[in-house]
Amino acid sequence: MPSPATAHLLHTTTQDLIAGVIIGSALGDAIGLYTEFMPASLAATAYPSRSFTLTGTPTNPIPTPFHFDTHRAPFQPGRWTDDTDHALLILLAFLHTARTPTPDEPASSLPLPTQQELAKRLRVWTSQGFKPLGTMPLGLGRLVGSVVSSAGFDSDPESVARGYWERTGKRVAPNGSLMRTWPVGVFSAATLSRVTHVDPRCVLACVIGTGLVRGLLRGEIAVESDIDALIKRALNWYSRQHDENDQKIDEPELWKHISSSTTLSQLHLDDQPTIGYVYKTLGAGVTMLRLAMRTVNDTKAAKLTRTKLFEEFITDLTFHGGDADTNACFAGALLGSYLGYGALPDHWKHGLLHEEWLLQKSDALCRVLGVQKGEYDGSKDADAEPEGGKPVISQQEMEGRWMVLQQEAFRKMEETAKRGVTKAGGGSWWQKAVGRG
């Protein structure tokens, strides 16, 4: 048994890492939005300083403005996108049935969200937005939109998702489930991926991603060989449990995206037809984690370096463009679970909209998991309810909100045009690019 002092240190460290996952992923999402759907060449032109701030600087106390186009116009700097919303749906579903365990009750006995619970919350999100914070459902992907709106999704989401996958030729493997499943790595992956994404590549990517988060939080993954060992275990797991009708995993294709020699340039993250490919997002996150481990483990100034790594790596990833918010969201979860909340840049995390709300949910999770003192009962947390503790929003009211949002977006675009700022491309804000979701 560890001494009380050692136990306190371990719990304090775990609290910092859990907050690092939650805030780190949201930060990656918010920073990645700056270049989402852009080719790398346009990203470099749009932001010549190659840096971002969400709080501003002493001489210019405003966040880095977006290079406005129809995709970014509805957003404020510091706001996350659907990527983080969907992850929070899983986190809130877990908290809703959770409470602080008694001294003789292990945290592992807490029930995990079911497929039906996540399906219900996705239905609410697609029609009413993220209700705890009153934000709109911006960025709904094609696959998620099609599956969630299908008959029977509430009762048997995996069957509906499988039917969609089969009807579309079993070819598309988007990153929409990988972006949302990091919370499972904190409190326990495959089951929740299959709510919308049943392609074996999506399922395997979620297993690897959540396994990495869990291993990092538990101190079981500290060097690159640990990453490789986990990937091999995930492959072995899939080979044992996959359905004989499922496609087999092309292991060389997987390793091409996540090996120790893979670079961001080799991933071609801004290749428009394939920007939403799940292995690209997985590869981006794993590559960033490998680089962080090499830097921390090889430098004598590890403490100083750790405070700079997150910003440097997420910024670099963002300037590769493509599905930058999703890539950086997943990478941010991995880096946050490795470096911790304390290593996240102040001028990013304190400019993140709703940071305090996220930290409250992080505290609640830590109390439920027994790594922080204090009581929590999810049944008394209105935010954790499927409707977010808010009344149902009618279709007519949502249409009115969309109209107001569209008018505000057009106003921003007009102001940008008057200032003579070049408009970047990037697709329309009411739908994601082909293959994303």
Image (spheres, rainbow, N blue to C red):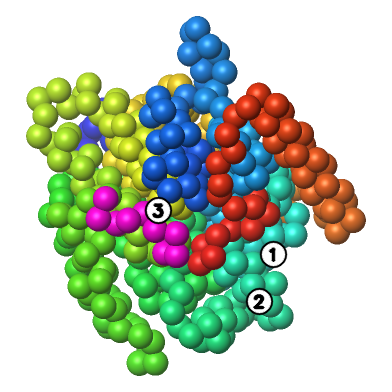
The type of residue carrying mark 1 is Arg
The reply to whether the C-beta atoms of the residues labelled 1 and 2 are less than 8 Å apart is yes
> What residue is drawn where x is 22% and y is 26%?
305
Q: Where is residue 210 in the image (x, y as percent from the top left)?
A: 36, 58
Crowd class of label 3 (few under 14; some 14 to 19; many from 20; radius 10 Å) = many
Segment tinted magenta in the rendering: 265-274
Q: Residue tagged by mark 2?
A: 153
Q: Which SS class for mark 2?
A: loop
Q: Which amino acid does label 3 sit on?
A: Asp
Q: Quadrant of the N terminus?
A: top left
In primary-sequence order, the first of circles 1 and 2 is: 1
Q: How crowded is mark 2: few (under 14 residues within 10 Å), some or many (20 or more)?
A: many
**Nearer to us in this view, 388 or 406:** 406
Say which label, 1 or 3, has the lower sequence index: 1
Pinpoint residue 138: horizontal percent, then vertical percent. Answer: 65, 50
Seen at 26% across and 46% down, the residue is 289
359 or 165: which is nearer to us?
165
Does 271 appear in magenta?
A: yes
Closer mark to the observer between disc 1 and disc 3: 3
Depth check: give the residue in front, 150 or 354: 150
Q: Mark 1 points at which residue?
A: 123
